[in-house]
Image (spheres, helix red, strand yellow):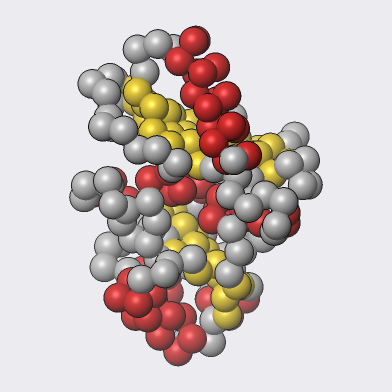
Amino acid sequence: MADKRVEAFVKQRIQSAFPEDGFRRRERRPPARRASAGWSTHRWHQLFQRPAHRCLSLAIVADGEPVIGVVYDPNHRELFHPCGAMALGSTTLIRPHPATTVKEACWHLASRHPADFLPFLQALLSDGGMFIRNGLGVDERRAAAGRLIGYEPHMNPWDALPGLVLMREAGGASNDFLAQEIQRGNPLLLASQRLPAAEKMIPQPLH
C-alpha cells in the first residue's frame, strides 16, 4: 500500500507540473503516451520489512534518451542526482570504484532469470570476484558512488534508468541498455571505465 501511495503522489505532482509528459511506474504500467519526455519511477517495495535496501528512484527520458536520474535513500538520508557533467551524493561528488580487476571489491547481482544470471556469475567467480544481493536502486547508486565495482545482469527500465544516468555522470561506463526494446528489460552492466574484465561478461562493449 505504501508503494502505491508514494507512486500516486509522485505521479500527481509530476503531471500537475508537466501534463504533456508520459509516466511509467512499476506498480502499474499503462501504454506509453506519445510524448517527447517521460518519467519512470520505482517503488518503495517492502520499505518497512527490509529498510536498509529500499529507496525511491526517478528518471526522465527525453526523445528516447535517459537524461536525469535521481535516487533517494530515506534510511541514510542520501540523495543521488546528476549535476552538470558530474553526479552528487547529497553534496559530495561521486565517482565509480577505481578497481582494475573484479577481485578488488564486490559486485551487486539482482537477476532472477537463470539464463541471464548464470553465465555472468560463472565469469565473475572464475576471475575471483565476489557479489552481494540487495535492493536494485540502492545498489545502482552505490555502484555510481564507488561502493561497489559493478552492477548486472538484467533489469527493467524503471529499475535501470536512474542508475544508468548516475553512473554515466559519475564518469563510469555501461553497456547500451537502450539498444533493444526495453519494455521487458535488458542486460545492464555499470562499472568503472578502468575495469576491462567487465567487457567479457556481457555481449555488448562498455561505453
Apparent side of residue 104 relative to residue 167 in the rendered image (left or right): right
Above or below, comparing residue 8 to residue 205 in the picture = above
Q: Can residue 167 be seen in this view?
A: yes
Rendered view: 7 above or below 106: above
Tell me if 97 is positioned left or right of 182 in this view: right
Residue 152 falls left or right of residue 187: right
Q: Which residue lies furthest to the front in this view?
A: 1
For residue 37, what is the image quadrant? top left
Residue 30 vs residue 114, the one in the foreground: 30
- Res. 69 visible in picture: no
Judging depth in this view, the residue of 155 and 30 nearest the camera is 30
The picture places residue 44, in percent across and down from the top left corner, at 60, 44
Q: Could you say which quadrant of the image residue 18 lies in?
A: top left
Seen at 53% across and 87% down, the residue is 128
x and y percentages locating residue 139 in the rendered image = 59, 57
Q: Which residue is drawn at 27% across and 23% down?
A: 33
Position of residue 120 measured from the top left corner of the image (x, y, whole percent): 39, 76
Please report the residue visible at 54 percent of the width from the left and 42 percent of the height from the top. Answer: 43
Residue 79 drawn at (x, y percent): 69, 37
